[in-house]
Image (tube, coloured by chain):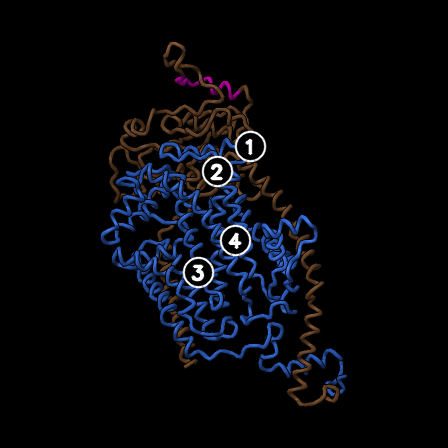
Chain colours: A blue, B brown
Amino acid sequence: MSETKYIPKSKFGKWFDSRLPLLTLSHHLTSYPTPKNLNYWWTFGGILTFCLMTQIVTGIILAMHYVAHTDHAFESIEHIMRDINYGWLIRYVHSNGASMFFLAVYIHIFRGLYFGSYKAPREMIWITGLIIYLLMMATAFMGYVLPWGQMSFWGATVITNLFSAIPLIGESITGWLWGGFSVDNPTLNRFYSLHYLLPFLIFGLVVLHIWSLHIPGNNNPVGIDVKKNSNETMPFHPYMVMKDLVALLTFILIFFGFVFFLPNVLGHPDNYIPADPLVTPAHIVPEWYLLPFYAILRAIPSKLGGVIFMFASIFILMALPWLDSSKVRSSSFRPIYRKFFWVLVFVVILLGYLGAKPPEGIYLILARIGTAYYFIHFLVLLPLLGRYEKTDPLPMSIADPVLHKPGIVDKFKEMAGSYEGENVGTFK
Amino acid sequence: MLVLLNNFIKKIVILIFLVGFNGSSLAEESKIEFISTDWTFKGVFGTFDRASLQRGYQVYQEVCSGCHSMQHLSYRNLYEKGGPEFSEKEAKAIAAQFEVTDGPNSEGEMFQRPARLSDKFVKPFPNVKAAAAANDGAYPPDMSVLAKARKGGADYIYSLLLGYEDPPSDIQLDDGVYYNKFMSGNKIKMAQPLLDGAVEYADGTQATEKQMAKDVTTFLVWAAEPHLEARHKMGFKVFLFLIILLTLVYLSKQKVWSRFGSKNLEEEETFDKIEKAVTEYEGEDPKTFK
């Protein structure tokens, strides 16, 4: 289990590895020590890597048949769905894959929030992760525009118009995004180009994300540092690989449940209507994974304010390692933070629900309360909690958090009694 | 401090729940129930009823196709597997009823010829503007993916076809506008398309309004999702494969992990530790532990 210095066995191996240390890298990746107590919430990193690769592979195949032109885009998608061999499968995997990618990334992010994985010395993992998340949103948004359905067109119109709210340079940015004076063929072309580019940037950032992870090693559910190369860790392969596989296959079952049996349930029916610049849909809504931000955007009465708050809601997360000043990582030992964590989860889901509703009446009021709470959580509650929260005592090692639970001695006496089937007094 | 905070959190959660539920109950009011029927294509093992698809094509051809195009379908789709499965000869005969413009020929002239299997369904109007102009300004939508382009899908289309009613007395309709309880806004520019006996089915099925609505809706669902049957079949196989693989992988994982941190081992370790801790706690030897 210990990470020893790797020396290739063969002569060629030595020659090769001293010039390009791929063997050392692969040795590092397989023997990488992981805490023994990682639970299934820690399997989403592997699942996300799978999602990214799936999107890239299916995307490359789709790109062979897709035509990025306003007159042909919709038709070419139908061509893929009807005439290309298994085109329907590849496209449904790609479109549902985007949703699954976000489902996994949200679990991954909230796991980080719950177990304090963003705290020192893991700030760079958190920040590279957030940049990946931002790029994912940009990629997914541009991908949704490509079929050139009604939601594609009007979603693109709403989102690109947001940039015009920026003072001085806003109009120029919008014009640059459009490549003209409205969302049109040049917009579609550049979105297609960027939609193809960004996944590879994400891939590069994933390498950085994993690299920065491999320096301090994994956080764990207890949140205390593990002694590397002790009996508290186990090598990544085969232990974590097997556990990741179990989780991945379960995830794929859910994923393929959508692909084969409910392929359109996560999309909007309006996107099967070809884009028409003269007909505005009754409600313009983004894909489900962007809804919380859409709710924040519309909760603010001014356009510029909405844009600022929407972007701030993500950028604020980058400052999280410093906003949360508590030294204790895991929520298991933070009784008050733990409650606020679940309130935050609830508020984000509520905002998602409100993002799909028209911004009026009770929905608007709730969205405003939710938005305010979201920012209060990070800007007020976390710094205060770091100061005033009385955390539970931390265990000495990841193996014995159990020893510090109150009443454990009585429990033990009881256990010992039933174990021996005798009175504890005669316990050997 | 702690108690205060706890109460505060509870109050917030209760408040949000209360307001949230009120909000959602307000939203429920405007929902309409679509009429449904026993669709054979629903569910994990759903397949199309061939006879219904063939009748549905007939309804489309004789009733809808005068105004509604289906530009993403080809005549060859009519005999392909998973669809209405007309014979190739029948499909050829269907195609040959239509004229398409081809060319240019060696003299540079465009010419008319009967449609072949490889041709797309011939459109009733050359373009959207012409279609709208011929229909009092309302464009009859292309029906290739209509079943996927409407909330409610098959149920919506079926309901709409059966939803024509006399308008309530407080609603005044203009000429060429009809009342339909499932259309958003209840006003529709399409006259009731299906009346009992509108077509004559070759297989002797009674051409009632409901029967035709069911058949043509089935046809539209197939048109929007021509690989639905293949998808369901493959999905079933994929699930079977994944469940077996998952079981094997899970068992392997248990086997691999038993080498390292078996449950029993961990329990034993914990037990040892608890014993030690109790010793320290009681300040006694566990053997004489009271």
Q: Are marks 1 and 3 in contact (CB under 8 Å)?
A: no
Residue A79 percent location from the top left of the image: 46, 32
Q: Is residue A111 above or below residue B174?
A: below
Q: The disc numbered 4 marks a residue on which chain? A: A
Three-letter amino acid code of the residue under disc 1: Gly
Instruction: Name the residue tied to disc 4.
Output: A48
Query: Which quadrant holds the C terminus of chain B?
Result: bottom right
- Which dot, 4 or 1, sits closer to the camera? 4
Marks 4 and 1, how far apart at CA: 35 Å
Q: Which residue is mark 1?
A: B82
Quarter location, residue A306: bottom left
Which residue in the structure is indicated by mark 3?
Answer: A127
Question: Hey, which quadrant is residue A376 in on the image?
Answer: bottom left
The residues tagged by marks 2 and 1 sit, at their Cα atoms, a distance apart of 23 Å
**Tag 3's secondary structure?**
helix
CB under 8 Å between callouts 3 and 2?
A: no
- Mark 3 vs mark 2: in front: 3
Point out the stretch of residues depicted in magenta: B90-102
Q: Which residue is situated farthest in the top direction here?
A: B107
Q: Earlier in the sequence, mark 3 or mark 4?
A: 4
**Which residue type does callout 2 highlight?**
Leu
Q: Secondary structure at mark 2?
A: helix
Front residue of this view, candidates A112 and A198: A198
